[in-house]
Image (cartoon, rainbow, N blue to C red):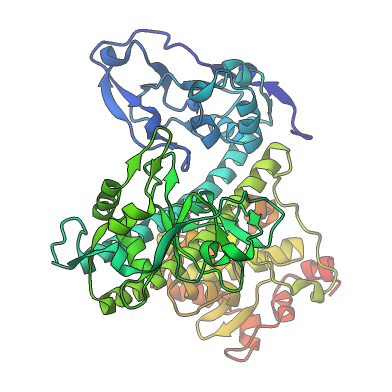
Amino acid sequence: MSAKFPTAKLTDIAELNPTLGKKLPAEELVSFVPMASLSAESAKVETTQDRPYAEVAKGFTPFLDGDVLVAKITPCFENGKIAQARLPRPHGFGSTEFHVVRARHGIAESRYLHHYLRLEEVRANGQRRMTGSGGQRRVPASFLADQAIPLPPLEEQRRIATILDQTETLRTQRRTALALLDRLTQSLFLDMFGDPLDNTKRWEWRCMSELFETSPIFGTMIPAEAEKGSWLCLRVANIQDWQLTLEDKKYVDLPTSAIERHSVQAGDLLMARAIASQEHLGKCVVAQPGDELWAFDSHLMRLRFRADKALPEFIRQMLRTPGGRNIFLNASRKSSVQYNINTKEISALEVPLPPLPLQQTFATRIASIEALKTTHRRALAALDALFASLQQRAFSGELTLAAPRSPAQSLAQLQQLEASIGLEALIFIAKRMPDGDLYNSLKAIYFADRHHLEHYGHQIYNETYCALPHGPVPQSAYDATRVLIGERMFSDFDDDAMRAALRRNDKKLTALRDADFSKLSRSVVESLEWAVRYCSDMKFGQTKTASHDSAYERTPKNEVIPLKYIIDTLPPEARQRHWNL
């Protein structure tokens, strides 16, 4: 994979499935990690259990805090159950379905190996090398042992791991936000309507058949294809976590006679009615096809409700509650190969039904929450793509520090804002400014720009400064901080990325992560560090006085400070060297 780094076999840089090495005292507590505790989504060991060594000494896999755990059995390996074990105890034990990778000290970093083994390419190759059959297929230890790992110097391994960790943190924050919004939705339902199973609010029980505009129906049996067909055919795979996802599209041509039966209208509830997992039986979405032609396949059931009886979004959210799931699953059944619910069973289902106006109030509130969730999902998709790109670049030796730019040859070259660098510069300063002082953080950007202009001949990210009453203000950075508290809707920076990285509380700016150093050149880091040191101990009045230089004084209040004025404040030798002024 790597064109720039030498490679080494995994077993040359790490121990694979090492033994415990020594017996522990029988009563010593160790951290026990069952397979369920290793999260494929967060790539972390989410929970551990304290157990005496005597209980786990036989029949379990030993490892140490910091080792990398690789689930070897299907489908855990394919799903990405690979994580560094960060344990509260020095010793850990867990499932026998773990391979253990222990980085050799001074040669490899555990976090670096963790990220490499999670590469999609590595997991795909591992899946092809699995041995066994059915649900007992496993990745052999020989597959990991033979892995040719790109091996940069230790410091570079640490830098790569840090960059990937930072991006993973952003992804985790987005997932957490989505989970919180999901819980908010459930809390709102329970607050307004109570638990459907207990029905403590005494709503009238109604049979679902009374609520339907048309009878429930299964979808088309016509096989859907990836490229052929005029109708987008929705399948169980298109309903993930009770949300519609159209990443995997397939199409059918519906005959005229089947259009009424198997087409989808706005407001139709599409439900998974036959599936291998009880957990996913009944998951459903409210369809909004717009101007597109949508159909649905035979593993889905279409429910079309009377507008004067029940709102589909109310029914969907009810079925997601624990009580609603209980009611629904009691009406379902299990065959030899899958869980099912048919049209008669869903029609006979009885549910508590509140008045329509209350359902409408609920649906309006849910729409606002769903809009927020859509924003977070789009941002998460972008972060997922960024993470995959960073992984590929990192292990091919392309994730280098930003190269220093050559000095600008004219003032016109100093005008175009580089927003991604600007955001990282603001994060860098906020992370290091004592007490998160907002005023000093913004002034530090100005001081850093002057320093960078003097020594390197160009600004850090081509910020524009305004002569406001308390000194020069970096307009893009200042506007970004105002977005954080709702004073502005948009800024020149990536507002989603900014909200995930920064918090503002009145006059305090807090960084939730460190800067992405792949976007900051060494010269930029040098100037930013200088500026933080320069003003970190200053009081408000001292910072104000220091920033009121000749460029500020020459500019009318509330106007943009011309870049020429700022350059005029620099030493003559710098102006001559960079711009021949």
In this orientation, which residue lies closer to the viewer: 60 or 447? 60
Q: Where residue 418 sits in the image (x, y, percent)?
A: 69, 67
Among the 4 quarters of the image, the one containing residue 352: bottom left
Q: Is 567 located above or below residue 294 in the figure? A: below
Query: What residue sits 34% from the left and 10% below the top?
Result: 58
Tell me if 570 is positioned left or right of 98 in this view: right
Number of marks in the image? 0
Residue 525 in view: yes
* Horizontal and vertical percent position of residue 569: 69, 75
Question: Hey, which quadrant is residue 60 in on the image?
Answer: top left
Location of the C terminus by quadrant is: bottom right
Q: Is residue 512 visible?
A: no
Residue at figure coordinates x 69%, y 42% from the top left: 392
Q: Position of residue 359 (x, y in %)?
A: 29, 73
Q: Position of residue 166 (x, y in %)?
A: 53, 48
Query: Farthest residue in the bottom direction?
Result: 556
Tell me if residue 375 comes above or below residue 34 in the rendering.
below
- The residue lying toward the viewer, choosing from 345 and 32, is 345
Image quarter where the N terminus lies is top right
Q: Is residue 109 left or right of residue 336?
A: right
Relative side of 548 to 353, left or right: right
Q: Residue at x 54, y 85 (%)?
A: 468
Q: Residue furthest front?
A: 257
Of 237 and 421, nearer the camera is: 237
Q: Is residue 335 left or right of residue 120?
A: left
- At horizontal 33% and vertical 67% (from top left) the residue drawn is 314
